[in-house]
Image (tube, rainbow, N blue to C red):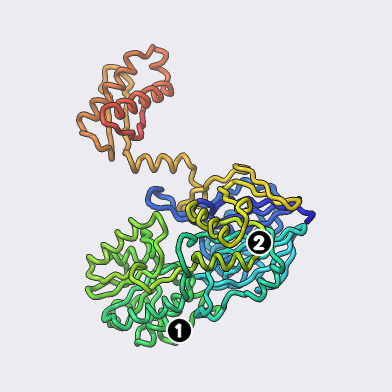
Amino acid sequence: MSGRLEIVPLGGLGEFGRNLMWIRAPNSGLIVDAGVSFPDESFPGIDRIAPDLSALRGEPIAAVLLTHGHEDHIGALPYLREWCEAPVYGLPFTLAMARRRLEEAGVSESGLIEVKSGERRMAGAFSFSFFRVSHSVPDSAAIWIESGGITLLHSGDFKIDADPPDGETTDWEGLRAAVGSGVDLALVDSTNAQRPGRSGSEREAGRGLASAFAGATGRIVLTTFSSHVARVAQAAEAAVALGRRVAFLGRSVRAVAEIAERMGRLRLPAGARPSGSDLARLEPSHLLCVTSGSQGEPFSALYRLALEEHPDLSLSPGDLVIFSARVVPGHERSVNRVCDHLVRRGARVMTESDPPVHVSGHAHKDELRDWIRAARPRAVLPIHGEHRMLSAAAEVAREAGIATHNVFLLDNGDSLTIEGGGFSLARDAVPSGRIYLDSRPEPVDSGIVRDRRELAQEGFVVVIVPPQASEEIAVASRGVAAPAGRLEEEIRRAARDVLSRATIEERRDPEWLRAEIALAARRACRRAFGLRPVIVPVVV
């Protein structure tokens, strides 16, 4: 082993989503995945959060490797492609999803290179091979990487499913041939490392959905992740067998369904898809609607159905709504709120807690142990998950026989270096912040996000200072949980105190006045009411 490799996570460790792993060799680099995360309602107005890519600018990037087509692994690709022209490699369905994401962002789709499972490729100082694994989106892959005699196995997101509906099992033969006598480091999906046993086959969810469909008398609305093609295909097959037609509601669901049909991953008989104008006229017992919104996202198709705001369809008492997806931590309140609205419409709601309408796409403990033993690594780096999950995966690695000093727990921005047969760890080696994104193409400044959160939590107060000292100071507030008359009087008193002690020169300095009045008003609110609203002084 004569080379040197540095592994730097810029997202995905200690959190859900934003997965991006930077692998550095001397004068060459690889990026594995470039994903976003989806914030909960504590980030007002923010749609997506991407990794801070500033550490990559100016670096020699030889290739971008995509393990699969979920947004938490490809969603930041458009922002990376604005300045990084390195070729992007992936299996066919993954690149189809990436191409759609780039099209929507108006970014060039050039440089996307399809690979086959087990095919060896070269880029810069690296050679690498993709190997198909089971997950909840087609063409998911683990990636074997070699540089300077050092070998890695990046699991991507995976589970071990011996009988998936699409028949595409994990490419164990190719993986074992690539691994040979073992790898230096295995990077292992930790999402379900706290869950005992095994995740169960995707066919179990298909059978559960078919059973639920058979007992339904009204409309059926199924919500799942739009990219879960195997789930959607099984649901569509069960619905068509019962004489139902299948409608896709929501932009992302329709787009993925079109890609899946084009690639032969989803097959519907002619006439099985009604138009939007036909939905309201169809007999309820003849319709399955597959919708976006499994995480309670505002403005999703399911959200609009729950609020009776969908332009093509209204729910009726007796309709069945099935949540065939895990609730991502942080979105529980949003999902519960949507469920409550659905029940108000008279719908019957089934969730993940009503098995078996959902099985996970991530490996449980026993599968992780099997994977680590198959990879035969000298060291293990848990990835993809919050810290408690990473810690649980580390314990599984130790149970699988990996020495404690060779099991590493990293945070975003840390660096793990492999050189001369040894490992060294550096904390906070590179910047690893967050980029906040809303409906506009430009990122949202973190200060604006902070202001939005403060406004949402404590409200704001405007203090208007007139030009003449004899005129009354005006105070207006919104969203401040304090007695209105008393709040205004406390803030006026604080502002008058500032003006009374100000010199003539200070009184003529608007910047000084704004700063002093904001400070005095904040102190008054904290002292009198225990509140910290945003204070906006206006000096006329």
Q: Amino acid at mark 2?
A: Pro
- The image quadrant where one finds the C terminus is top left
Lateral position of residue 363 relative to residue 30, left or right: left
Q: Amino acid at mark 1?
A: Leu
Instruction: Estimate how packed mark 2 is, as few (under 14), some (14 to 19) or many (20 or more) residues with alpha carbons within 10 Å.
Output: many
Q: Nearer the viewer, residue 215 or 177?
A: 177
Q: Position of residue 479 (x, y in %)?
A: 28, 40
Residue at the image position 24 percent from the left and 66 percent from the top: 343
Answer yes or no: is residue 356 visible.
yes
| Residue 321 figure quarter | bottom left
Q: Nearer the viewer, residue 280 or 158?
A: 158
* Label whose residue precedes the other's in the sequence (1 or 2): 1
Residue at the image position 57 percent from the left and 57 percent from the top: 398
Q: Which residue is mark 1?
A: 268
| Residue 536 figure quarter | top left
Q: Which residue is mark 2?
A: 377
| 370 up-or-down from 7: above or below | below
Answer yes or no: is residue 74 visible.
no
Q: Position of residue 118 (x, y in %)?
A: 68, 73
Q: Position of residue 228 (x, y in %)?
A: 47, 71
